[in-house]
Image (cartoon, helix red, strand yellow):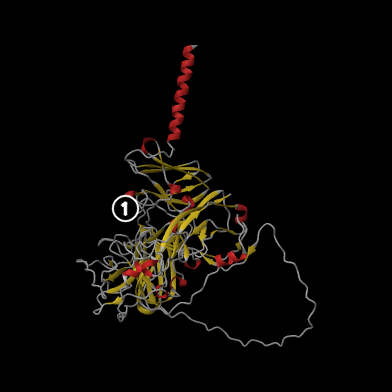
């Protein structure tokens, strides 16, 4: 009997150890010494955020054997995509996928899905009852998306919208696809890509990212760079674009080719609208009747106020070549949220002041951080808020001096904290924009350590045309602290000793067509007296956030608005900007109210990262604080 009891005790002990091991495999304990943290970075349908390299909600757990784990509960669907990162995209050696590409899987039925990563072998596995790893390319249609450069014929006048029905390609065998645009105007620098199922997350083809002398002229890369199209021989042309997937290999993502046929065309016909004189009818005169007042109908459950259409967030990924198109929704604004919202507050949250566009001024502009560029990454119409860079006397380079810049301490960007970031774009006569990258195709960074500093920017165009960026081009920023005399005309940066071939910029953007005209130098800027700046105090802004809850039953009927951010002691105008997070969440720039879009939801937690900025005053500095807000759907 004693032996039996001892055996039972040993068995129970073994079971406890095994159970503990199973729990530890998914435990989020502190990492062992020398171990790295990993994140799942993927599309929104998988991760809740859109390709965020360090979203806390997608941090992997450390388990047995040095493996990292992340578990999700997913609905049936296709095109779940992700990669594994160490918290950023900066070093490609620390980003892991399937043969260098996104790991793609489908879910045939709702189930728990486990993603496992082995840091030693770099092997990724995805398991679950309904998980299916596709073995071939599965799609319904292909669209062409790109930059029409303000031309109404190319891409049917639609810029970077992969879902546009007008740009669906025709096919008979799902191997060769074609589309023709008639009456495309003469222009150098049109750009485009081929997009699967009208969605960037589903995949795309573009120009080779690292072409060599041996790269065929018609070759395409899966998720490649923008393809450039030049119409130079005719004032108007008919352009036929062909995509050939006959030899495309899904495993290697290679073998796709394309061609462009350009023939002389005609200018698009324009039809003047018919004008008819309105009929004039004398109004009838009637005796006034006794007025009757009708009580307004009220709905105790929720109050709905019609609001003007609001525009969703736009993101331009200037280093990756991917574009996320602007989505515009005109929906009802409902005040039936978790908290009571007055009609006056709702109007403030949705009302937008329309500022008329200024005349287009061609030239090179700085776009990026608002503190140095005039507006936060507003690259579509930079002439509305800024002036172009000045051409040097000999026209060999361009420069701009920005005075009275606040220190970058506390400024948070996607590239990191405490820096300002920017690029150079060229705007042509019709308002089309071309991005000019630095030597690596990334944003240029500058750190400003003291308030009241001056930054001198210089840029050398290395290509024959401002619409054909060169990868060796660079914009140089030199910072002068208060008291240091900045030059009225900065000296040009040193040009590279080797000349690179002209190539398209990695970032999807708008482009220019003709060489810039020489611009007369601007009046010499005056350096502000540092004594007036150094007396500024730190902005005492305080920001707190609360988790809010909305009901999925109400989201079926209308979008819901919540106030989750509280700002106190701010000096200067307060503004709010979405940094990242769920596409289902938007935020009002003025009020900071968060809107959950109308739709069908399951119980879930949505996240949005918001940058709150107090502009500052003559006495107080500008300051930004970034917070993450959670909205629970029940």
Residue at x-position 75% and y-position 67%: 295
User: For the image shown, how many numbered marks are present on the structure?
Assistant: 1
Above or below for 293 versus 547: below
Tell me: 623 left or right of 216. right
Q: Is residue 110 in view from this perspective?
A: yes
Q: Which quarter of the picture shows residue 368?
A: bottom left
Q: Which quarter of the picture shows residue 431?
A: bottom left
Q: Nearer the viewer, residue 279 or 286?
A: 286
Q: Nearer the viewer, residue 306 or 530?
A: 530
- Dot 1 falls on a residue whose secondary structure is loop
Q: Is residue 435 in view from this perspective?
A: no
Q: Which quarter of the picture shows residue 617?
A: bottom left
Q: Tell me residue 348's x, y (percent).
A: 56, 67
Above or below for 429 versus 549: below
Q: Nearer the viewer, residue 573 or 467?
A: 573
Tell me: 177 left or right of 443. right
Looking at the image, which residue sits at the far left?
A: 497
Looking at the image, which residue sits at the far top?
A: 1
Q: Tell me residue 515's x, y (percent).
A: 31, 78
Tell me: 330 left or right of 135. right
Q: Residues within 10 Å of mark 1 (few under 14, many from 20)?
A: few
Tell me: 80 left or right of 471. right
Q: Tell me residue 391's x, y (percent).
A: 28, 77
Q: Tell me residue 526's x, y (percent).
A: 31, 76
- Please give the residue where the numbered disc 1 appears in the rendered image: 91
């Amino acid at each position: 009997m004693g032996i039996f009891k001892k055996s039972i005790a040993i068995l129970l002990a073994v079971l406890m150890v095994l159970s503990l091991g199973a729990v530890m495999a998914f435990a989020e304990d502190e990492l062992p010494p020398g171990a790295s943290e990993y994140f799942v970075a993927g599309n929104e349908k998988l991760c809740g955020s859109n390709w965020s390299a360090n979203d806390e909600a997608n941090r992997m757990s450390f388990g047995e054997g040095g493996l990292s784990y992340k578990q999700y509960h997913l609905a049936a669907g296709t095109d779940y995509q992700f990669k594994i990162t160490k918290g950023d995209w900066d070093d490609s050696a620390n980003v892991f996928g399937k043969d260098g590409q996104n790991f793609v899987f489908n879910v045939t039925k709702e189930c728990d899905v486990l993603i496992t990563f082995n840091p030693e072998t770099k092997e990724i596995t995805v398991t679950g009852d309904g998980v299916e790893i596709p073995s071939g390319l599965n799609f319904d249609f292909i669209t062409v998306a790109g930059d029409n450069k303000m031309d109404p014929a190319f891409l049917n006048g639609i810029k970077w919208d992969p879902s546009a029905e007008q740009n669906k390609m025709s096919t008979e065998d799902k191997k060769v696809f074609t589309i023709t645009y008639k009456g495309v105007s003469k222009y150098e620098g049109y750009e485009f890509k081929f997009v699967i199922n009208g969605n960037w997350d589903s995949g795309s083809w573009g120009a080779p990212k690292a072409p060599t002398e041996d790269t065929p002229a018609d070759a395409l890369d899966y998720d490649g760079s923008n393809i450039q199209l030049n119409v130079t021989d005719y004032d108007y042309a008919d352009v036929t674009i062909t995509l050939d997937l006959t030899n495309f290999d899904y495993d290697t993502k290679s073998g796709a080719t394309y061609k462009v046929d350009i023939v002389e065309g005609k200018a698009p016909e324009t039809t003047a609208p018919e004008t008819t004189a309105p009929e004039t009818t004398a109004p009838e005169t009637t005796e006034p009747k006794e007025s009757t007042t009708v009580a307004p109908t009220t709905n105790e459950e929720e109050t709905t106020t019609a609001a003007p259409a609001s525009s969703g967030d736009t993101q331009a990924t200037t280093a990756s070549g991917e574009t996320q198109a602007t989505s515009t929704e005109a929906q009802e604004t409902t005040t039936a949220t978790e908290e009571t919202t007055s009609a006056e507050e709702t109007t403030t949250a949705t009302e937008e002041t329309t500022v008329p566009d200024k005349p287009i001024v061609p030239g090179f502009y700085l776009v990026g951080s608002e503190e140095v560029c005039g507006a936060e990454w507003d690259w579509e119409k930079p002439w509305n808020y800024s002036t172009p860079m000045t051409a040097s006397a000999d026209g060999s380079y361009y420069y701009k001096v920005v005075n009275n810049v606040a220190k970058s301490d506390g400024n948070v960007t996607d590239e990191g904290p405490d820096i300002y970031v920017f690029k150079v774009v060229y705007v042509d006569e019709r308002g089309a924009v071309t991005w000019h990258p630095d030597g690596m195709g990334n944003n240029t960074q500058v750190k400003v350590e003291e308030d009241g500093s001056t930054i001198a920017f210089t840029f050398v165009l290395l290509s024959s045309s401002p619409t054909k960026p060169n990868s060796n081009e660079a914009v140089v920023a030199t910072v002068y602290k208060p008291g240091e005399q900045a030059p009225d005309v900065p000296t040009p940066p040193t040009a590279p000793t080797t000349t690179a071939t002209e190539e398209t910029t990695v970032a999807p953007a708008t482009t220019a067509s003709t060489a810039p005209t020489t611009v007369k130098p601007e009046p010499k800027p005056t350096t502000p007296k540092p004594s007036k700046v150094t007396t500024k105090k730190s902005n005492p802004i305080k920001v707190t956030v609360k988790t809010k809850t909305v009901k999925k039953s109400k989201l079926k009927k209308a979008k819901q608005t919540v106030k989750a951010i509280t700002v106190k002691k701010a000096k200067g105008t307060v503004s709010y900007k979405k940094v990242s997070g769920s596409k289902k969440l938007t935020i009002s720039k003025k009020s900071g109210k968060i809107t959950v879009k109308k739709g069908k939801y399951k119980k879930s937690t949505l996240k949005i990262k918001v940058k709150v900025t107090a502009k500052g005053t003559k006495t107080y500095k500008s300051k930004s604080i970034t917070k993450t807000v959670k909205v629970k759907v029940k």
